[in-house]
Image (cartoon, coloured by chain):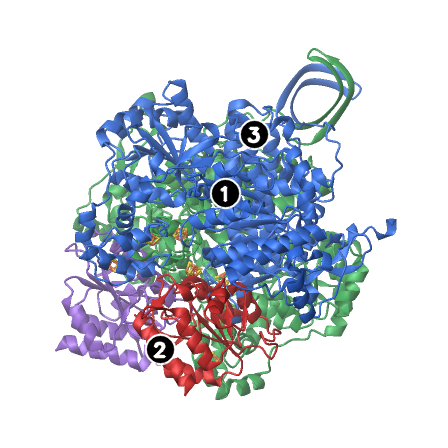
Chain colours: A red, B blue, C green, D purple
């Protein structure tokens, strides 16, 4: 069941995410990408692990991996408040819509992202955006680093506990540090 | 005046056209040219009449599709896997399929409103005759049906005229639905254009329904001081028999209320409503009470408050009758749209039906005569209330603690909960004696019951939450303003200028259902924020209820705190779902009354005017239905942007502008014919926002229009910047796109702006007389 | 006669009713009582008018649901998981959801036919005026619109009258669609009743379309000797420019044919059609040719035969224009239902459009004026034919062998093929030089192209199959009889008795699309089997084509072998999809003309008559569409059973009787009021059969009716037993259920039957005057 | 992929069949059933393994297991031709419809089947009937002994080759024999 979609009805996918069995694997895949981005949604301040909000784990991860962050909703303020400046901010729909445009040259203008990581959007919204990308951005790879399996991504962590999640994020951060 | 079915019988007559014998005529239409407005180019538009306009919008705001499913299962050549460009057996691809689903939703929505209107109009014609005059606001509202005039070119004056308008709608809906058949449209953009057409038709259907009921039932007529109505479960007097009406069609409720009035029972029973029927009840009867939005159904029935449940049409839970049966509340199904398998007792004597319901011989009946519904509902309520004694099926707090111990922590409830609420954790705490986490879920729970459906040990989780939140529930004592109906012409005259110039920073229309991500408080907060900022805030339907369901520091609800005027800082509840065209109508009337643009059959020009000049934005924070889709579509078609809350992403298609593509934002300057870049104003036509903070920033920004004067623009920008700084903790990154000349810059922000503009290599430009329509260019004449 | 919009202007007139000045009247209706038939109880039925009748049927034939999906995704409260009894966020369960999907399909179907009718009627009224008289068969067809009369109570006499009929349909469709909105109907049986209502409305919409086009375009008028039409790809003269019309709406084709005739080009070009447009073309123009059913689209376009592709509405592949572009054939989109994203060139000069298409400047255009379509299509075809030189994109046999070597044997093609065809094996053989297995797929392949979509190495598998089967394709030279339209009253008079008594063993209607499990041959075999058994065999649409696409031992097609009379052993093509009401109409006319039952607004009584007495059965062997669903629903509602081929299981709901439940099969004896058990006759109302053998046995059995005389019953049983023995290799196990008295037993089978009856403890019973309606019982009078 | 639905689009199932990993497991489950039936569809004469039609394997299996057979379509004749008398025959829809009726006492009148095995119907038709049973016959267990994975069944063999299939059927037959 760990690779069932987290929300019961999110089943209708013929092409399903490869499960990420170990955080190390995710890191290896991210390292292969030339233009990765990380999209962070509004749950970043609502989910807590080890008493710390998700966003703090993500800041560590972003600092270590140097992946440019796109903050959605009002998350930019939450990042800034914590001393991290996202590369950009816009609504989740806007970033989704740019990612399906093959002409878009990325937030830095240096090339269309080849890997988009997602984390912290409401599950169903993230699922829908990943579906949009699966269908309409065939050359883009997508990965979620949530603790909920997302069938529409290219790669997804399986469903897991908050502890698993915290650990995965920390391992990934460490792997990038070293 | 138009009228139909006037019957003339001539025994014998000799005239210049010949000798007529035994002629019987039903007069189709008596032509009367008292409406002097010339007919515009597109009366009664068909599927393709406004396609060019649609394509202009769709080119600026391109669809972004997020399929909910990789498949299409609409015909038996399928199911087809359409993943990532694979075509189905009919050659369709996922883009076209996605837009087809949008068309289907909008068609269902338009059909629902039009069918509702048809039922109301047919019923009223039967009761009052075709010649019954329409009156939605006396002399204050001369433009009584702006949407109908605009779309169809008809100026309806009597109930009978509305029949003709509805025939147009029904014809279009049939065509639109047919396009969803396999092997019709191949292009996603043409599907989208048809979805926009469905939105136009939908607005007409709604308008017809509301002006018919306003006119005949004497609802508040464009009245800014429509009465304040008690709202909330806490306002229900449970010492009286309680009749609860759920749905959208007020006709059966009118039957109930009339019966009560006629029998001097108006203060002997409580008539309470849920969903739009609640709003329209209180437009008819100011002692009616509003329980709450659609999502309150289970809690109210299970809580045992209702002695009789009357179900009409739309948004009625399919298990409402089963839940009522559990608390021994008889059910009356009062709509041919929702017969619930009950026996049709319309032609049986009322007292027989009453006896069967009170004795429990049958759990419910179908009655299609609203007057009989009234009699039966009242009599049953009176007889059964002493028997039922408000029997409820909510568990006690101790029972909850005990039952929570049986929870297996399997997570299935959470995984089946649309809100992804952490029920397992709350139950764990409850099992340990701590109900606080369960209580915390009360505000976010939309009362859908899906958690219970998934639970392997059959815990009634929603009831647990309601019981744990009972204190809040019983404290729900608020006010809603009865739906006022239309905006007066004189109101338009006084604020038309400030709106078009941008000095009133915007019109915010907060509409639609209660599928909120975190409860209704967000709606209240947003409305209040913008009312305080002296936007015009309009509400309708469930959102109108949520807006009134919270209080300020002085204990005043929103409707007490702010006036009901269509004016800066006013908060207006226009009414139920079918009252939404008064919102579109207000924008249309700005173009017509203030700017003196012709209305009749002149859709493109008016939409172009609104799109470029009227800073209106719709927010459907909890939109869930196909009707909400078609309502939104009616606004898109007029060029008015609509925001939805996160669940709105499940409409699976956004209409998004690209602020980063400069070339997308050119308009004609009607004075010169030049193309002028006006920036992304408004940036999107349909957009999901995640949080209330994001919604507020987006609203402020989406009110910007190319036509703003420098003064208006600077006011709008100052709201945008202010909210952005407060909620995003930083300056907007796109300010340079909205500055035409330095005069646009808000006074107090000169320095900040100057730095930004320099960094962005900004250049001054002109403020055009903006239009997307080349034929509006007046150059030759000047 | 009824007529509308007749305009009268009276300057001044003094009459007994007063002094009238400057009155302008549009006359709504001139009442004329030349139709003396009294109005029945249910004219213009609404959603619940016939609910009791529906429930009678639904109680006898209960729905068996087979959900295609565990979810509902119709609103944004969802998606909801409805597995095995879980309710969704609106309280709906999977049973109600399943029936809602049926309602949605039937509503789409009814809307499609009604929208089609609306387009045709509006167009013809514009061209010929409202007063143009209807004529579907002169004096031979006095009951010109049996379905319309039955359902609406209107007797249409002019084109204008049809307008009123369509308004009724559009109103009902709007109501029906609205019931699919979230929060409307809660009961699956009420959804089903509404789906039956959609079927009734659909039959009316279709009838309107066909009688309008028959009357104005002078299609064969109830003509048993309608011309034989050349059919099959092999009949197309490729030395001429070829215009190919795909779809269902003949109006643009008429534009083409008229232009050819007016310009003396009738023999200079080939006008060929696919799908129902093909059939209606040939009703208009007997030099028109039929390419084949819906599934022939890809092979004909890719084969390069068409120089111009004209697309109207319904059943048009969404990629038809893209495929046409590959072979450089310009496309004309001729329907507002299918604009394909093309620029609307309706108002441009024809020659400009021609130039743009011939030069390839644009691949296609939208033209909504059928006369302009005619001119442009013909001119383009003439100019481009010498340039294109029938360019095709089929690979050579050698290329196939080479390309087959790149196949990865991944099975994805087969897994995406709706027919589950073993393509990998065929490609393996091809790679080894053996094309026979590929050729073997030709007959079963429905040309959907899904295999190609799935192939990771982009093999054009369908083209491979077509090329491998090219020999068969080019040998397709057959005949279809042009659709004859209605059945004559005189034909009804002569066979009504034998049908009702059971002496003509049945009417088999083979209708619908080409989603066959193993190709069209099954359709031919079934039709021929029953024609030889002297059933009356009626065909329409793609099935009419397939029936004519094979030959007997003497080389004769079905239409050559059998007469086109409505008589025992006749094989009648009534026409296109919208001609199907002539089939229902024939059954209705048996009740009306032969049995003298009143027709007008008398639905229940007529349906009850047909259900119990007229041994008719529908077979939609390849039904695929929402239209097929609504057509079937129209038959169910009349109590006529419908069989579908295996893909029909994907309609996800059967209506099945239970032969093993004795209590389900009681009727009233109208003579006595007694309840009489008449056995399972007919056993099912909607049923999927797997194989042609099963279909044949089922057809014979489903023609049995309670009213059969002993002679009729024995004839029917002998066919049933004979087919059962031949195809099932054994005696039926349920014969005892069909024997009322020993006289029912077929002469030659006495001994066999006696043994069976003894074993089953059979008891003699009476032959009643059967009815399901208690009000039909005449006991009191006798 | 072996437990993907055989036809690509048959994915929309939240409750999915447990895969039968070994024929022995299927035999054990069948043996536990009090009233099993075997429904055989029209592909029984169209599929061949080792040069023999499926129906012959099924006759062996039915003879060994003593499970009563319900033949659909015209298969009864094919069985009779081969000297095997099915317990009953009726259309596939009729057997499906009876199985969802909790009052139905089975073809022998001795009790409602508790396990229905399916084999040899067109894949999509079998899928639909299994779905009908999953939703509307909650107490019934269903199993397919085809070589194509059927998500709507309670138990299903994974997708497999014709050889696998022939072997499974033979193993099952043998296990019942001994
Ligand atoms: S998720 Fe929705 S669209 Fe997809 S298969 Fe299920 S019901 Fe159909
Ligand atoms: S409508 Fe087209 S894509 Fe959808 S199931 Fe039918 S053939 Fe497949
Ligand atoms: S009733 Fe409340 S807790 Fe239960 S699933 Fe619905 S929203 Fe979640
Ligand atoms: S579904 Fe029921 S048992 Fe499972 S975690 Fe939720 S409440 Fe507990
Ligand atoms: S389209 Fe919807 S109903 Fe069809 S298979 Fe997908 S989820 Fe199910
Ligand atoms: S219509 Fe009902 S079952 Fe379907 S998605 Fe909406 S809430 Fe769920
Ligand atoms: S085109 Fe033919 S072979 Fe290909 S998937 Fe369709 S039916 Fe199967
Ligand atoms: S999908 Fe393509 S590669 Fe795979 S088996 Fe079929 S033809 Fe071969």
- 3D distance between C-alphas at marks 2 and 1: 49 Å
Residue C262: percent from left, percent from top: 79, 53
Query: Is residue C139 something that shows in the picture?
Result: no
Q: Judge from the rendering whether residue C24 lies leftward or rightward of residue C212; answer left or right.
A: right
Count of labels in the image: 3
Q: Judge from the rendering whether residue A19 lies leftward or rightward of residue B732; answer left or right.
A: left
Q: Is disc 3 surrounded by few (<14), some (14 to 19) or many (20+) residues within 10 Å?
A: many
Residue C241: percent from left, percent from top: 73, 67
Residue plotted at (65% across, 19% down) = B8
Dividing the picture into quarters, in which one does residue B159 lie? Answer: top right
Q: Is residue C542 above or below residue C405?
A: above
Which residue is denoted by mark 2 in the rendering? A168
Residue at the extreme left of the image, as rendered: D178
Residue B61: percent from left, percent from top: 62, 60
Which residue is denoted by mark 1 in the rendering? B112
Going from N to C along the chain, the mark reached first, 3 or 1, is: 1
Q: Secondary structure at mark 3?
A: loop
Ligand 4 image position (quadrant): bottom left
Question: In the image shown, does C428 or B356 lie closer to the viewer?
Answer: B356
Q: Is disc 1 surrounded by few (<14), some (14 to 19) or many (20+) residues within 10 Å?
A: many
Which residue is denoted by mark 3 in the rendering? B221
């Amino acid at each position: 069941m760990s690779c069932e979609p987290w929300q019961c009805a999110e089943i209708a996918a013929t092409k399903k995410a490869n499960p990420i069995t170990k955080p190390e694997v995710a890191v290896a895949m991210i390292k292969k990408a030339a233009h990765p981005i990380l999209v962070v949604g509004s749950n970043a301040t609502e989910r807590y692990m080890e008493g710390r909000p998700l966003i703090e784990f993500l800041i560590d991860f972003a600092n270590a991996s140097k992946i440019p962050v796109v903050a959605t909703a009002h998350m930019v303020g939450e990042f800034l408040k914590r001393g991290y400046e996202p590369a950009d901010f816009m609504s989740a729909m806007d970033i989704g819509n740019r990612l399906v445009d093959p002409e878009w040259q990325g937030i830095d203008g240096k090339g269309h992202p080849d890997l988009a990581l997602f984390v912290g959007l409401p599950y169903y919204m993230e699922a829908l955006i990943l579906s949009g990308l699966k269908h309409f951005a065939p050359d883009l790879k997508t990965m979620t680093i949530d603790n909920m399996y997302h069938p529409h991504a290219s790669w997804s962590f399986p469903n897991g506990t908050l502890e698993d999640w915290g650990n995965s994020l920390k391992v990934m951060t460490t792997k990038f540090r070293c | 005046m138009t009228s139909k079915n006037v019957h003339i019988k001539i025994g014998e007559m000799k005239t210049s056209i010949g000798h007529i014998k035994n002629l019987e005529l039903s007069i189709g239409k008596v032509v009367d040219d008292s409406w002097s407005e010339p007919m515009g180019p597109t009366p009664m538009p068909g599927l393709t009449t406004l396609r060019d306009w649609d394509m202009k919008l769709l080119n600026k705001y391109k669809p972004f599709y997020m399929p909910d499913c990789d498949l299409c299962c609409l015909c038996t050549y399928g199911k087809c896997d359409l993943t990532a460009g694979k075509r189905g057996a009919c050659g369709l691809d996922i883009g076209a399929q996605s837009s087809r689903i949008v068309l289907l939703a909008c068609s269902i929505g338009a059909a629902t409103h039009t069918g509702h209107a048809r039922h109301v109009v047919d019923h009223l014609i039967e009761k009052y005759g075709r010649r019954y005059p329409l009156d939605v606001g006396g002399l204050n509202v001369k433009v009584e049906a702006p949407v109908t005039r605009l779309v169809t070119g008809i100026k309806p004056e009597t109930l009978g005229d509305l029949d003709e308008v509805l025939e147009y709608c029904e014809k279009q809906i049939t065509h639109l639905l047919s396009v969803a058949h396999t092997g019709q449209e191949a292009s996603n953009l043409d599907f989208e254009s048809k979805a926009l057409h469905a939105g136009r038709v939908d607005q007409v259907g709604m308008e017809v329904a509301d002006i018919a009921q306003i006119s005949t039932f004497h609802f508040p007529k464009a009245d800014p001081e429509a009465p304040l109505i008690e709202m909330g479960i806490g306002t229900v007097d449970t010492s009286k028999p309680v009749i609860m009406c759920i749905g959208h069609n007020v006709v059966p409720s009118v039957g109930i209320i009339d019966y009560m009035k006629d029998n001097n029972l108006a203060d002997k029973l409580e008539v309470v409503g849920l969903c739009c029927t609640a709003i329209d009840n209180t437009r008819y009867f100011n002692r009616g009470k509003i329980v709450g939005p659609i999502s309150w159904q289970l809690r109210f029935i299970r809580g045992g408050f209702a002695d009789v449940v009357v179900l009409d049409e739309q948004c009625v839970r399919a298990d409402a009758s089963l839940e009522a049966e559990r608390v021994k509340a008889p059910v009356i199904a009062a709509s041919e749209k929702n017969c619930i398998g009950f026996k049709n007792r319309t032609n049986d004597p009322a007292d027989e039906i009453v006896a069967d319901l009170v004795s429990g011989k049958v759990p419910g009946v179908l009655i299609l005569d609203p007057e009989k519904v009234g009699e039966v509902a009242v009599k049953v309520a009176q007889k059964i209330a002493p028997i039922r004694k408000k029997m409820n099926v909510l568990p006690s707090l101790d029972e909850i603690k005990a039952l929570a111990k049986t929870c297996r922590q399997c997570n299935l409830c959470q995984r089946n909960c649309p809100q992804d609420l952490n029920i397992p954790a709350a139950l764990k705490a409850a099992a340990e004696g701590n109900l606080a986490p369960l209580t915390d879920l009360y505000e976010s729970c939309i009362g859908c019951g899906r958690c219970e459906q998934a639970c392997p040990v059959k815990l009634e989780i929603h009831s647990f939450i309601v019981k744990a939140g009972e204190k809040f529930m019983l404290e729900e004592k608020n006010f809603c303003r009865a739906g006022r109906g239309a905006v007066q012409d004189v109101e338009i005259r006084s604020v038309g200028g400030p709106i078009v110039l941008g000095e009133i920073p915007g019109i915010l229309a907060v509409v639609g259902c209660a599928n909120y991500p975190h409860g209704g408080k967000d709606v209240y907060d947003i409305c209040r924020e913008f009312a305080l900022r002296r936007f015009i805030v309009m509400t309708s339907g469930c959102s109108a209820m949520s807006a009134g369901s919270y209080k300020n520091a002085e204990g005043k609800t929103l409707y007490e705190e702010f006036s009901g005027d269509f004016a800066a800082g006013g908060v207006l509840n226009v009414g139920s779902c079918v009252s939404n065209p008064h919102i579109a109508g207000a924008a249309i009337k700005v173009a017509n009354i203030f700017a003196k643009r012709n209305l009749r059959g002149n859709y493109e020009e008016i939409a172009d005017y609104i799109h470029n000049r009227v800073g209106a934005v719709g927010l459907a924070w909890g939109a869930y239905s196909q009707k909400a889709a078609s309502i939104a579509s009616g606004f898109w078609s007029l060029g008015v942007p609509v925001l939805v809350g996160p669940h709105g992403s499940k409409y699976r298609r956004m209409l998004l502008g690209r602020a980063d593509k400069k070339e997308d934002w050119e308009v004609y300057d009607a004075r010169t014919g030049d193309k002028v870049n006006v920036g992304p104003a408004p940036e999107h036509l349909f957009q999901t926002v995640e949080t209330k903070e994001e919604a507020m920033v987006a609203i402020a920004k989406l009110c910007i229009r190319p036509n703003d004067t420098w003064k208006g623009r600077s006011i709008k920008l100052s709201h945008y910047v202010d909210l952005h700084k407060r909620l995003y903790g930083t300056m907007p990154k796109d300010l340079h796109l909205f500055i035409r000349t330095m005069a646009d810059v808000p006074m107090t922000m000169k320095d900040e702006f100057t730095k930004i503009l320099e960094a962005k290599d900004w250049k001054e430009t002109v403020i055009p007389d903006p239009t997307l329509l080349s034929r509006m260019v007046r150059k030759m004449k000047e």
